[in-house]
Image (cartoon, coloured by chain):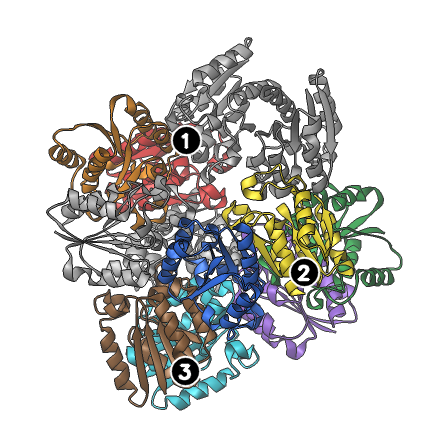
Chain colours: C orange, E blue, F brown, G cyan, H red, J yellow, K purple, L green
Amino acid sequence: MKILIINGPNLNLLGKRDSNQYGSLTLTDIENLILKEYVNDEFSFFKSNIEGDIVNQIQNAPQKFDGLIINPGGYTHTSVAIKDALEIIEIPKIEVHLSNLSKREEYRQTQITTQSTDGYISGFKENGYLAAVYLLKKLK
Amino acid sequence: MKILIINGPNLNLLGKRDSNQYGSLTLTDIENLILKEYVNDEFSFFKSNIEGDIVNQIQNAPQKFDGLIINPGGYTHTSVAIKDALEIIEIPKIEVHLSNLSKREEYRQTQITTQSTDGYISGFKENGYLAAVYLLKKLK
Amino acid sequence: MKILIINGPNLNLLGKRDSNQYGSLTLTDIENLILKEYVNDEFSFFKSNIEGDIVNQIQNAPQKFDGLIINPGGYTHTSVAIKDALEIIEIPKIEVHLSNLSKREEYRQTQITTQSTDGYISGFKENGYLAAVYLLKKLK
Amino acid sequence: MKILIINGPNLNLLGKRDSNQYGSLTLTDIENLILKEYVNDEFSFFKSNIEGDIVNQIQNAPQKFDGLIINPGGYTHTSVAIKDALEIIEIPKIEVHLSNLSKREEYRQTQITTQSTDGYISGFKENGYLAAVYLLKKLK
Amino acid sequence: MKILIINGPNLNLLGKRDSNQYGSLTLTDIENLILKEYVNDEFSFFKSNIEGDIVNQIQNAPQKFDGLIINPGGYTHTSVAIKDALEIIEIPKIEVHLSNLSKREEYRQTQITTQSTDGYISGFKENGYLAAVYLLKKLK
Amino acid sequence: MKILIINGPNLNLLGKRDSNQYGSLTLTDIENLILKEYVNDEFSFFKSNIEGDIVNQIQNAPQKFDGLIINPGGYTHTSVAIKDALEIIEIPKIEVHLSNLSKREEYRQTQITTQSTDGYISGFKENGYLAAVYLLKKLK
Amino acid sequence: MKILIINGPNLNLLGKRDSNQYGSLTLTDIENLILKEYVNDEFSFFKSNIEGDIVNQIQNAPQKFDGLIINPGGYTHTSVAIKDALEIIEIPKIEVHLSNLSKREEYRQTQITTQSTDGYISGFKENGYLAAVYLLKKLK
Amino acid sequence: MKILIINGPNLNLLGKRDSNQYGSLTLTDIENLILKEYVNDEFSFFKSNIEGDIVNQIQNAPQKFDGLIINPGGYTHTSVAIKDALEIIEIPKIEVHLSNLSKREEYRQTQITTQSTDGYISGFKENGYLAAVYLLKKLK
Amino acid sequence: MKILIINGPNLNLLGKRDSNQYGSLTLTDIENLILKEYVNDEFSFFKSNIEGDIVNQIQNAPQKFDGLIINPGGYTHTSVAIKDALEIIEIPKIEVHLSNLSKREEYRQTQITTQSTDGYISGFKENGYLAAVYLLKKLK
Amino acid sequence: MKILIINGPNLNLLGKRDSNQYGSLTLTDIENLILKEYVNDEFSFFKSNIEGDIVNQIQNAPQKFDGLIINPGGYTHTSVAIKDALEIIEIPKIEVHLSNLSKREEYRQTQITTQSTDGYISGFKENGYLAAVYLLKKLK
Amino acid sequence: MKILIINGPNLNLLGKRDSNQYGSLTLTDIENLILKEYVNDEFSFFKSNIEGDIVNQIQNAPQKFDGLIINPGGYTHTSVAIKDALEIIEIPKIEVHLSNLSKREEYRQTQITTQSTDGYISGFKENGYLAAVYLLKKLK
Amino acid sequence: MKILIINGPNLNLLGKRDSNQYGSLTLTDIENLILKEYVNDEFSFFKSNIEGDIVNQIQNAPQKFDGLIINPGGYTHTSVAIKDALEIIEIPKIEVHLSNLSKREEYRQTQITTQSTDGYISGFKENGYLAAVYLLKKLK
């Protein structure tokens, strides 16, 4: 299965952020964890701090991938543009959050992009990505 | 691993509810699916429509189980009592919702019980339970 | 016609509550009033203070009854569980409130369970039950 | 018994509106239904799209009628003027809505006029008028 | 094409109102502007300060006209009655506002009637009417 | 001085309404009270339950009167149309309320029409009109 | 008649403030205006920027005065203490505001103290005080 | 004096919960503390996680007890049913909370059941119960 | 034990206020009641209508007293200054309200000062002060 | 006339989105439609998913164009940056939305960018662009 | 330059409050810091817990000072009276907060007094005063 | 000291914007002002309209700079992404706004990015940057 994993703003700095919320692995560590757990699948990792670049990637995903995993970071709560892009594409798509959003600040409770995904996983740190792959394969 | 799976109000009627939201399996179908996928683990299934009975089960879980999976159904959005019970016990605990809550009615957006779990999975119908077991084993 | 009439919390104490709001009859008086007005129909009366017991009754109603009348009392405003149960069953169902809810406290203005009924009657004290039977027969 | 039945804006177009919400009868059909069901009572039907005309009718009703049934249509949610008129008159008065308001748009949840009636009936389409007459006779 | 143009409360006083918001033309000037720009179409102009009269005109419009342009003035923000009337008729209907509503007072941001039109034009003063005719001809 | 006094919906029924709020005089009593107190001024009294008729009167007032006193009744809280009409005319204009609005229901706290008057007087029952005339003469 | 006139914070600076809102007279000018208009009554003028001093004055007023006029300035919108003091005393009491509060900032729309007065006058600048005396004499 | 002390959901687990909020005593410790401090009074202790069971106990309390102390736990914030039950019975009734609710989460600030008690005590941990008995004896 | 008891605005008028809410004793009666019940403790009573004076007293309390009881009256709901002063001092401190605040006006539901006390007692009229002393001795 | 037409995020995918809302034409189809209808004007089309790129284009527009038409897509509801850019430039500028925004999701009702345009057109699908050009020529 | 520095309630206790928020210096330490850094300017320091005293100082400031620095403490969020006083005086005026208000409790986010200053500085502890003097000299 | 100064969207157009709010200097003027006032420090100026570019700059800043000054322009109110980036880096960071935000539109009152800075300065136009440098040197 060919899977695109998109990470939004500041996720490139994982490992430097509060480990209670985000775990202690870097984004590269997480990528290796995924590659090691799912050796028979093909992954492409994209990370960007720029909202529009993420929209571009989402729009093009169906041409090259069978499924999409996205952690939109701070854009989860504000981006109607990413939400609309996710709504348009028709491959399976799953949203992952490292921390348990329901426990956090009020402004992180509004989930805009999430409404256009098949489902979401929140609170399991790096394991959330592994579960997302596990579920993408079920959704196929 | 010994796992308790609690299902709250109206989940005993799965299969009769809107399949777009909840999938087409009955609760027994889902239980069998779990047993079949995880043959080496031990599961106990509890279902009740009564808020206080669910509180009782949660309070007693740590004595007999290594982990807890709960779908509190309609109580997710209102029950401070279940939330407090989940907060007190110290085994890993995961909340599952069959439908993607972020897409549904306003009153389903307030997640009270969820704040006392390790994390939650929403929108993957029966597969949400499978992923919850998958994650419980990672959290161990 | 076989009709189930469910009364929720504190309705067993009718006659001791504010008669301006609830009328001066006891629940037994009301049951007798119904039996006397509709001698050719068959009624079953269920009352409980426990939310989950009411959910159980609703779930089982379609097997034994042609119609359901419910006064969920205080659960009207908070119970997603009762709402979901009412939504699942497919016999005609009518909600009755003794007092005129639109005149009362703010927290009684949110009507959760009502959204899953065919319709509702509010403000006519004991006569509301009589009108509910009258309407159930029209809906048949 | 002499009864005035007032229908507010757009109710003259019943039969052309969404039948799921309003039923498929025209206002004349409903009037005939009432006359046929209650042959021993005397009815006067008034319909108007003009808020002030409805206020005028309500103010004069006690001189000629024993009871009042009103479906204020869209004015239910905005008219303090109709609410005040209903509050002043002292004959029994019942509000009817064809659709189940608790299921509909947010702006239809504010019920201004309803607060000045004895009670209300919502969701039973044309049968709501029949039940209103049934109840008016109980209130007498 | 036969077009009805309805202007609501206080629009008869155009020319006396704040020209920054509404332009400096009178309603008659605007009518002449329309007639001059669209010489091959037939126009009927109706203006009233009375909500119910506007409802009446809307209800009757489909019998005589191919399209409807309405500026509901102050009723835009409060009239469920006009909204319902617009929803029922099936000819093309366009709402026009002289001023840019998004820049104005909070209470002018709630647009009730607008929800039942094909679309709306706001902020172009007298030219808004011309564009509405232009668009009605496209919608035909 | 020539003064127009406009009374809105249900004020024609003064004397039948709650005397704690509105005083015990009828509207005719109040008119006589004014005429007796201000024998050298000329008064015209207009009362209507119809929003649009009140708009018409306001629009025409400057041609015949030196000042305007208005009690918009229930329209105070909802009528953008009356507000706009008051804003356009340029004679002194004063709003009167019989009851002390700040003590009453939440929905009576929104004062739309008031924003377009010179000022307002609330809570002095019939004396409010007398004070309004007193002030109109100061504003002249 | 013996009348106490209390002016709250910053009213001692009248004449330096925005004359569109407050008029161009100083507080002394206004006091003289009152004394000149009502030569047969006895007035005591109290002004303070301190909330508690105003509470003290109100509490003691009934022992020496037949009526009270108060402009609580900025305390109108926040002072539960002044509100409670006004509620306790039983002489007639009138609140005056120089500007038309309904036209001003959102935070000036909450009127706490006003709820404990007989009524209020807003928007007539210095004339508001004259009308308050006029009304106090009617209330006597 | 015969006193019933009701403890709601999760209070059976006191001693395992955050001691900063709830103190370090178990519920049995607290019961012994009360018995030791008030040796001449008679106490009955009831605890349950089930809302409806608590309603039942409250309804029956007046037949056997002179006063009622209740800590409704998580139901404080949601239970209209318990509130209504408390309102109906006529013996003195006091609500106790171990923690200072005014300092805690937003959803714990809504106090539904409290409105039907004589008064409440919050923030004194186990001593709150002692003070409640002390006050019950004053209320007698 | 040396105890300071602070009473805020309008509490000096107890006995003249609504006895249903506040009881029928004067503040001096209450002081005598306390002195009589607790003959072995030393009390200082301070009352003021001025927010800043209360802040001053609180700041100086730890130098002379072992505990503080405060009824901030109307300042409970607005005073960040009193709240901050209470937070800074480190002796036990208890807030008392004569009436049951949870039953009263909306603006009395916001409890600012309370958040900086150990706990609070509300609804027991004069007995609330006695219970506060009882609890202060437990907190010592 | 030289006109710049800016299309924001996801508008490059028109034709793949819900045709009820957006029509069935692609963005290229719409561009051709415009070019065909207005053969004597000069158009430049810019589309981007990146908020900052759109800000750049707006800032530079006055140097090369006589007017600007913008459909900010999802940024309409969140972008203070685009709003500020539009406010700074002084050529005529019109906002277009394909769907009738007043009928859609709550989060699409907040129109930030719109406040800095001359006016807006919403609900006429591809024809909205044609009407925008029509109006730009009137505004010139 | 002659500068008045006003500190509001509880700032006299600096050094005893949470040093993370307020720093560890006392108010006297801060005054010395300012005097040492700006030896050529003349400073007057005023501190009070009483709202009205602060209003008095502000009103008189322009007669003796070239600029004003104010830290209104808890009154920042509630005092319309201080806000109005600041608005009236015409010397440069700067508001300082020791802590970063944007990070703190919800009720500290409403900034009433701030709206009448030239600008404000928040979060730099004692250095905020130094920067305020630095800026006052630029504003001169 | 090495300082990075970041300016967000539309700040490149300073000098063309409302001078009452933003002052009359261009961004280059401001840069020169800073360089002239602080000749011994080293400055790097970055400006961009693109949210993600600003996130990139912030993430890299600690490697090259001792302190950061940022004016996020319109992104202040919406960007969780910039907020998160600021939170992660550990050099001193100060937010500057040219205008006094507390006086401006409602949507500019929500300050998201500000919560992750040491402090902020608002309302002093170009001098705000100078004071920010002054404070950075104190924070060092």
Three-letter code for the amino acid on which mark 2 is drawn: Glu
Quadrant containing the C terminus of chain K in the rendered view: bottom right
Q: Nearer the viewer, residue K133 or J105?
A: J105
Residue F16: x %, y % from top left: 21, 66
Q: CA distance from mark 1 to mark 2?
A: 59 Å
Between disc 3 and disc 2, the foreground one is 3
Q: Nearer the viewer, residue F120 or G139?
A: F120
On what subunit does the disc labeled 3 rest?
F
Q: Is residue J52 left or right of residue E9?
A: right
Confirm or deny contact between disc 3 and disc 2 (CB under 8 A): no
Same chain for marks 1 and 2? Answer: no
Quadrant containing the N terminus of chain K in the rendered view: bottom right
On what subunit does the disc labeled 2 rest?
J
Q: In the image, what residue occupies the spot 30% across and 23% down?
A: C60
Three-letter code for the amino acid on which mark 1 is drawn: Leu
Snapshot quadrant of residue C81: top left
Numbered mark located on residue H11 in the image = 1
Q: Is residue F127 left or right of residue L82?
A: left
Vertically, is G75 above or below L50?
below
Numbered mark located on residue J57 in the image = none
Q: CA distance from mark 3 to mark 2?
A: 42 Å
Vertically, is H95 above or below E13?
above
Residue under pointer 2: J87
Q: Name the element at disc 3.
A: helix
Q: Name the element at disc 1.
A: helix
Residue under pointer 3: F63
Q: Name the element at disc 2.
A: helix
Same chain for marks 3 and 1? Answer: no
Vertically, is J94 above or below J52?
below
